[in-house]
Image (cartoon, helix red, strand yellow):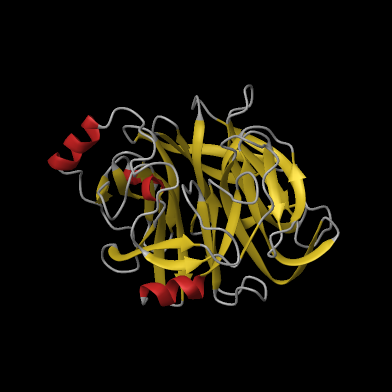
Amino acid sequence: MIIRTLTVLTASAALLAACAMHEVDYQGEGEGFVGEGVAVQARLETPSVGTAGQDAADDPAVWASATPVTIGGVRTRGFVAGTDKKAGLYIYGIDGAVLQFLPEGLLNNVDVTEGLSAGGRPQVVLGASDRTPGKTGVALYLFDPAGTAGVQPWGVITSDVVEPYGFCFARRGTEVHAILVGHEGEVRQFILTVDTIGKPAAREVRRFDIGTISEGCAADEATGALYIAEENVGLWRYGLDPAAGATRTLVQPVAPGVLVADAEGLTIIEDGAARYLIGSSQGDSTFPVWRIDGARPEYKGRFVVGEGAVDRVTGTDGLDALGGPVGDAFPEGVVVVQDDINDAGTQNFKYIDWRDIRAALGL
């Protein structure tokens, strides 16, 4: 893999970062405001998370299998993990139904990866930033596709970050990296391995500071890029290689009509030879999209999720996407987003067919 050397932050971007010293929520025209963007509709939704009347649902992660697996006694071709940041981790089916709930505490962002084996078999690994007092860091879980036990707690990566916030996995060759983003912009990057008795082991390989409150992160292994959203400043591209240090490029500053604070979740979807970065512009309930497989990210436009089979989406925090077949319902990929204001109850997650987004944006 070729790691591109990223340019140093420009003076104007540094000034912008220096001015953004405090968290600012919802820079649009009020709660539920939806900005301009091409319209799509969600195909289905999950039930409301269990914590009612609070900001609780936060971030999803999608995993798919070519063959059926068993979770909660149900045969499924994949799952969506979704955090209730007041209570724990939900495991949903491709149809949105709850398959499992793990009452694990104050989990914020969640991601999923492959590439590790435990107990003599390949495992699916889930990681979530954990703000539960006494165990702050990254909570880890295993799912054995060949088993029937569902998602099981595995261990924790301990960290000195006071309030773990954002989290994402990354692959660098055969290495599995776990990247934790603290509420105040502290970044800790670990290499995750399995020890001789099948437990997780983590070695910190990089730490740096973003500057102010940050959360969403997504890694593009093909170009060696790590994208991080600094909520009131903009979208940054770092090197995924730990040797890149804190060197970064400002991809998109917070600006009306493109990315409105808070800049929240980030995810990458592969569509054939193309790869797209999707962000959550929480301040105006839109989703900006960049094509990222070229020399530099290319902005392609924004979409909004309107009323349809289920209610519209507003104030999204976390989101995730997966290209290729995701069960029979999403043959070319799915985008799953948190919905802050859910007409049918408390917060939940909505599933959008990638084909609808691609057609709406003319990708």
140 over 184 or under it: above or below: below
Report the side of 211 relative to 204 (left or right). Answer: left
Quadrant position of the N terminus in the picture: bottom left
Give the total number of marks visible in the rendering.
0
Residue for point 38% across, 40% down: 26
The spot of residue 253 in percent (x, y) is 25, 47
Image position of 269 (left or right of 243): right
Viewer can see residue 91: yes
Q: Is residue 241 above or below residue 355?
A: above
Quadrant of residue 201 in the image? top right
Q: Position of residue 197 (x, y in %)?
A: 75, 42
Residue at horizontal 35 percent and vertical 55 percent from the top: 35
Q: Residue furthest top?
A: 134
Q: Is residue 117 above or below residue 141?
A: below
Q: Looking at the image, which is closer to me, 345 or 219? A: 345
Q: Measuring 22% from the left and 31% from the top, which residue is drawn there?
A: 18
User: 231 or 276: nearer the eye?
Assistant: 231
Please tell me whether residue 292 is drawn above or below residue 113 in the rendered image.
below
Residue 198 sits in quarter: top right
Residue 240 appears in the picture as rendered: no
Rendered-image quadrant of the C terminus: bottom left
Residue at screen point 48% across, 49% down: 316
Residue 98, image x and y in percent? 74, 54
The answer to whether 296 appears left or right of 273 in the picture is left
Of residues 197 and 297, the one nearer the viewer is: 297
Q: Could you say where residue 270 lies in the image, as x and y percent from the top left?
A: 47, 69
